[in-house]
Image (tube, coloured by chain):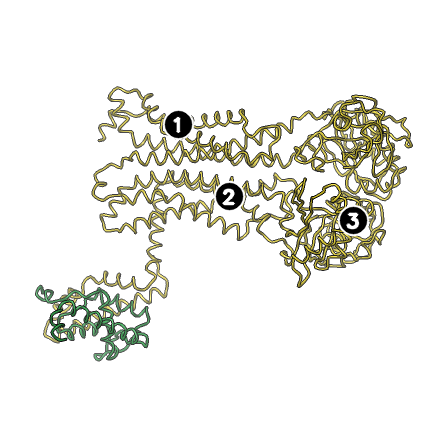
């Protein structure tokens, strides 16, 4: 071993010091008349063991403990190398357990722990409301135009801003370049609240944010680079956005992100009219210097107490009270994901516990096998403390190597997980393995070493010098029972995870196999953005639909084509209607609303149950409406509504119900009814597209929705999408389709959350099952090895090897059965927490439980039988001779 | 050799420190010198073996009660000499007073009658 320089000097000094001692002592003796030889020998004798003196002196230097640690580490590494099977299983187990935790924690970190990438994020907020009374709730609130004006003008403690609820697809035309991209509409001071300053240009002014103010746009850095080549002279250039000229006034910095994450931003120009009549604005706030949140909250409540919305609420909820309060923007943005992410973290914790239980069992066996070595070391003078120290160092080594491998596994798992998530699913730009995640992984490794090392360390403390040397390391019944207990524990956790995954799978199957209410086979849809000034004119809108559909119907193989504002599986527009006649007259109803062209029901094959569908013969002046079955059932109590009248509150039109169509499955993301499954059949009304002659209505709904062209073909059509694009171009050469979708794509997008839940929980519970199987396998395999002699005797005395196999295998099966029972009891207590994410399946689902029991039994039998096969190869004569 | 050992008294833990500090009170000395001084001053009763002396010296040095430097001895030999530091002097005073208390207490226990008669 090479010593460091400073250490070597110290060593030489000690050598010289001792040499001078010996020399002086020898000289004195020689002065007294002894010969040089006699003197040196006597001095040596008197001095004692020079090496030992040096050794004990060195210990006083302080770094002796460090050297001993190095030595113990080297010994530990040697022990791990000597036992590659054990080390490999242990490190793999740890890598999987720690890796799963690392991946999940990096998401927890990115969502809940990391500060938002803005200056002073703790001073940024969003507004929640707590209501009491008949409908109590506590959640983030969006606001209407009046509330926005009051917030802006009467809450001096805050810099406030609003944005549209989400980005919308728009067409950008710069010269001959046409591009479909995501536009975010934000108020003045939006970027001030975020503390973002454009790298060139400026933010929106208050003047630009007034209704009908100048049209200006701010580019994201990425769009500036790709569409404008990073041209610094881009300011004051004019581009066609949404069919109208906009002046570019700024470019955001490269790393600037916003809660909207749009490609281009335009001024929201909010007012009390149009979309400002309902709560369509998302507010963000920043506390001004010197102000405090309590003061801001008081100002908000005072300002909004006078609003129309407050008055309406008071009227419809007598005795109810609304309290508004600020919540940190971070919490506001991650609120819906938080419980899911924390549940995942809990599941990952279960996996780690299972891994630790396995390792505790494995290390226990290893320690007991090493009893010979330990006893020898005790006999050679090692202290109990030194032995324990060595064992803990080996555990620590294992945990650290496993942790390092876990970081690798976690990195790969995280990549996979992020690939699984749809774009913009997480409200953060990046999820990375940063210092905090690595710190977490390190602490986790240390924790695991303590968890799995504790049992074996306790067991070896009882090693007794006298009784142990003669024994052959037979493992007592106590330690087997201990290991069985560990396995029962991990099986119990596995059962809970399997059952939870099973329930989610059943939910997903239920949702995916819901009768859609139409025929999705052979249907392709394409979206185009009509958030375009040219199509605010109802005549131009009608012309576009008619011409493009006529051309599409001529494509060979196309059976029918239609346009709808939305299609099944999607979120629909919410609208208010009032029943105008009959005994339900005056009843106000919130409902899904879809404008459609006459071929819509035909193209999707939605059955007409009463009355008729729309026809091309219906004139734009006619006021017709079709309702779906749920609408008829809910609001007309099953009576035939054909011939009755509805008043649409925004279009203020009295419309005749001409037909009833079957329900289709749509997304519940618009939250019309609380607590419904993500896919649901809800009340829906259909208006003829031709009848929508309100320019303001058209411009508003098209900022929120991009209508879909629906095409039904008899079979596969070569180059269909290209022909559809050309058909659209024949009506408007500057209108690109933003994308083509099969109905199954739309369903997948709506069920993305459920699919992710299923994928994650299935992966985690499979991991748990695998680890449990490894645990059972290891237990039984050890038993076979340790009891070889006993089995040999049994067989020699007339037992069959089959009986011996059953005798040995019982230990694994028994532990697993106990775990299964414990797990089922746990399920009864814990699965109730899943109620809010289950649809179409109860918490206590017999089929799920049955499959879990079946799977666990199968895996247990496999993990037990494979190692017991070795019993058959035991030769009694040989094992007995060995003794 | 054997008789030599019979006269020796095993040193109490911590006593060696006091002896070393006391010995260095009269000036710097090297390790061999210290062991000789203790032997002679105790009338050959206390013999400090090297296996205790050197660890003690290095420990005291680490506590900064003594300081070492290489000097040349009377017979022109390079030796490592230790001397008391200011902190060492304080420590010596403290340990001396502890020792005196202890020995007074021991005397009180071992000769209770004498003490009474004195009173």
Disc 3 is placed on an element classified as: helix
Q: Nearer the viewer, residue A677 or A856?
A: A677
Task: Name the residue beneath numbered marker 3.
Answer: A145
Task: Name the residue beneath numbered marker 1.
Answer: A813
- Kindly indicate whether the residues beneath marks 1 and 2 are on one polypeptide chain: yes
State the mark number for residue A101: 2
Q: Numbered disc 3: what chain?
A: A
Callout in the foreground (3, 1) = 3
Callout in the foreground (2, 3) = 3
As drawn, A107 above or below A302: above
Between disc 1 and disc 2, whose residue precedes? 2
* Residue A554 at least partly seen: no
Identify the image quadrant of the N terminus of chain A. bottom left
Q: Nearer the viewer, residue B83 or A846?
A: A846
* Residue A196 at least partly seen: yes
Q: Numbered disc 2: what chain?
A: A
Give the class, few, some or many, for how many residues have Cα within 10 Å of label 1's Cα (few <14, many ≥20): many
- Kindly indicate whether the residues beneath marks 3 and 1 are on one polypeptide chain: yes
For the residues labelled 3 and 1, the Cα–Cα distance comes to 67 Å
Task: Please give the letter of the chain rendered in yellow.
Answer: A
Task: Please give the letter of the chain rendered in green.
Answer: B
Q: Position of residue A611 (x, y in %)?
A: 83, 22
Q: Position of residue A635 (x, y in %)?
A: 77, 28
With A653 as the anchor, is A264 left or right in this view? left
- Kindly indicate whether the residues beneath marks 2 and 3 are on one polypeptide chain: yes
For the residues labelled 1 and 2, the Cα–Cα distance comes to 29 Å
Between disc 2 and disc 3, whose residue precedes? 2
With B9 as the anchor, is A559 left or right in this view? right
């Amino acid at each position: 071993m090479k010593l460091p320089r400073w250490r070597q000097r110290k060593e030489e000094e000690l050598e010289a010091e001792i040499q001078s001692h010996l020399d002086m002592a020898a000289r004195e003796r020689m002065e007294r008349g002894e010969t040089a030889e006699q003197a040196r020998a006597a001095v040596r004798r008197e001095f004692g063991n020079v090496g030992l003196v040096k050794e004990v002196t060195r210990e006083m230097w302080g770094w002796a403990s460090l050297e001993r640690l190095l030595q113990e580490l080297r010994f530990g590494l040697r022990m791990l190398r000597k036992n590659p099977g054990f080390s490999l299983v242990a490190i793999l187990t740890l890598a999987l357990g720690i890796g799963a935790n690392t991946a999940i924690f990096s998401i927890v970190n990115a969502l809940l722990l990391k500060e938002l990438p803005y200056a002073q994020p703790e001073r940024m907020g969003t507004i929640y409301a707590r209501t009491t009374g008949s409908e109590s709730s506590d959640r983030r609130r969006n606001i209407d135009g009046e509330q926005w004006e009051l917030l802006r003008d009467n809450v001096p403690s805050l810099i406030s801003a609003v944005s549209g609820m989400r980005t919308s697809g728009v067409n950008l035309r710069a010269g001959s370049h046409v591009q479909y991209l995501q536009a975010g509409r934000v108020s003045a001071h939006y970027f001030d609240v975020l503390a973002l300053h454009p790298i060139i240009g400026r933010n929106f002014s208050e003047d630009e944010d007034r209704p009908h103010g100048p049209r200006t746009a701010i580019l994201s850095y990425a769009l500036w680079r790709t569409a404008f080549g990073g041209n610094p002279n881009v300011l004051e250039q004019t581009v066609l956005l949404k069919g109208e000229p906009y002046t570019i006034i700024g470019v955001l910095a490269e790393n600037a992100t916003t809660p909207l994450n749009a490609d281009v931003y335009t001024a929201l120009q909010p007012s009390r009219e149009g979309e400002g009549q309902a709560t369509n604005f998302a507010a963000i706030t920043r506390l001004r210097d010197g102000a405090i949140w309590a003061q801001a909250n008081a100002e908000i409540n005072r300002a909004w107490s006078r609003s129309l919305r407050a008055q309406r609420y008071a009227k419809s909820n007598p005795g109810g009270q609304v309290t508004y309060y600020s919540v940190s923007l971070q919490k506001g943005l991650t609120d819906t994901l938080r419980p899911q992410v924390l549940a995942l973290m809990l599941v990952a914790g279960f996996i780690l516990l299972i891994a630790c239980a396995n390792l505790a069992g494995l290390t226990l066996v290893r320690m007991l096998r090493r009893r010979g070595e330990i006893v020898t070391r005790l006999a050679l003078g090692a202290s109990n403390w030194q032995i324990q120290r060595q064992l803990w160092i080996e555990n620590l080594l294992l945990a650290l190597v496993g942790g390092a491998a876990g970081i690798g596994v976690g990195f790969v798992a995280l990549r996979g997980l992020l690939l699984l998530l749809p774009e913009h699913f997480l409200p953060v730009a990046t999820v990375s393995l940063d210092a905090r995640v690595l710190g977490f992984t390190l602490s986790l490794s240390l924790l695991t070493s303590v968890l799995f090392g504790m049992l074996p360390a306790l067991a070896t403390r009882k090693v007794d010098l006298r009784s142990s040397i003669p024994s052959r390391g037979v493992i007592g019944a106590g330690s087997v029972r201990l290991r069985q207990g560990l396995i029962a524990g991990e099986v119990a956790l596995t059962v809970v995870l399997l059952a939870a995954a099973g329930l989610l799978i059943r939910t997903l199957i239920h949702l995916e196999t819901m009768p859609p209410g139409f025929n999705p086979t052979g249907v392709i849809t394409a979206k185009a953005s009509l958030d375009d000034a040219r199509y605010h004119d109802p005549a131009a809108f009608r012309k576009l639909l008619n011409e493009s559909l006529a051309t599409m119907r001529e494509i060979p193989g196309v059976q029918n084509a239609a346009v709808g504002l939305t299609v099944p599986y999607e979120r629909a527009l919410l609208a208010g209607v009032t029943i105008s006649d009959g005994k339900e007259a005056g009843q106000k109803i919130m409902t899904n609303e879809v404008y459609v062209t006459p071929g819509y029901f035909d193209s999707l094959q939605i059955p007409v149950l009463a009355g008729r569908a729309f026809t091309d013969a219906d004139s734009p002046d006619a006021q017709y409406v079709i309702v779906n079955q749920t609408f008829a059932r809910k609001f007309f109590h099953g009576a035939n509504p054909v011939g009755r009248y509805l008043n649409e509150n925004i279009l203020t039109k009295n419309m005749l119900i001409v037909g009833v169509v079957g329900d289709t499955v749509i997304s519940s993301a618009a939250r019309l009814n609380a607590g419904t499954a993500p896919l649901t059949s809800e009340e829906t009304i259909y208006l003829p597209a031709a009848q929508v002659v309100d320019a303001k209505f058209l411009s508003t709904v098209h900022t929120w929705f991009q209508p879909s062209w629906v095409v039904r073909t008899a079979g596969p059509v070569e180059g269909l999408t290209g022909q559809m694009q050309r058909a659209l171009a024949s009506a408007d050469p500057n209108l690109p389709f933003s994308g083509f979708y099969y109905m199954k794509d739309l369903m997948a997008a709506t069920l993305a959350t459920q699919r992710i839940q299923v994928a994650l929980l299935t992966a985690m519970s499979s991991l748990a099952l695998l680890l449990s199987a490894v645990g059972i396998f290891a237990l039984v395999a050890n038993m076979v090895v340790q009891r070889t002699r006993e089995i040999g005797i049994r067989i020699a005395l007339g037992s069959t090897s089959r009986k011996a196999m059953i005798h040995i295998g019982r230990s694994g099966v028994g532990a697993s059965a106990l775990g299964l029972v414990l797990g089922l009891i746990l399920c009864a207590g814990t699965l109730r927490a899943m109620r809010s994410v289950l649809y179409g399946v109860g918490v206590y689902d017999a089929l799920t439980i049955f499959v879990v029991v079946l799977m666990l039994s199968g895996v247990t039998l496999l993990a037990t039988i494979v190692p017991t096969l070795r019993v058959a190869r035991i030769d009694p004569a040989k094992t007995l001779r060995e003794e | 050799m054997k008789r030599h050992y019979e006269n020796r008294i095993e040193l109490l833990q911590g006593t060696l420190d006091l002896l070393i500090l006391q010995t260095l009170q009269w000036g710097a000395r090297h390790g061999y010198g210290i062991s000789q001084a203790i032997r002679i001053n105790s009338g050959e009763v206390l013999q400090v073996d090297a296996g205790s002396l050197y660890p003690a010296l290095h420990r005291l040095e680490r506590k900064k009660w003594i300081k070492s430097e290489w000097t040349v001895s009377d017979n022109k030999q390079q030796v490592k000499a230790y001397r008391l530091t200011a902190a060492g002097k304080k420590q010596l005073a403290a340990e001396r007073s502890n020792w005196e208390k202890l020995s007074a207490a021991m005397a009180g226990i071992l000769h209770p009658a004498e003490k009474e008669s004195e009173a």
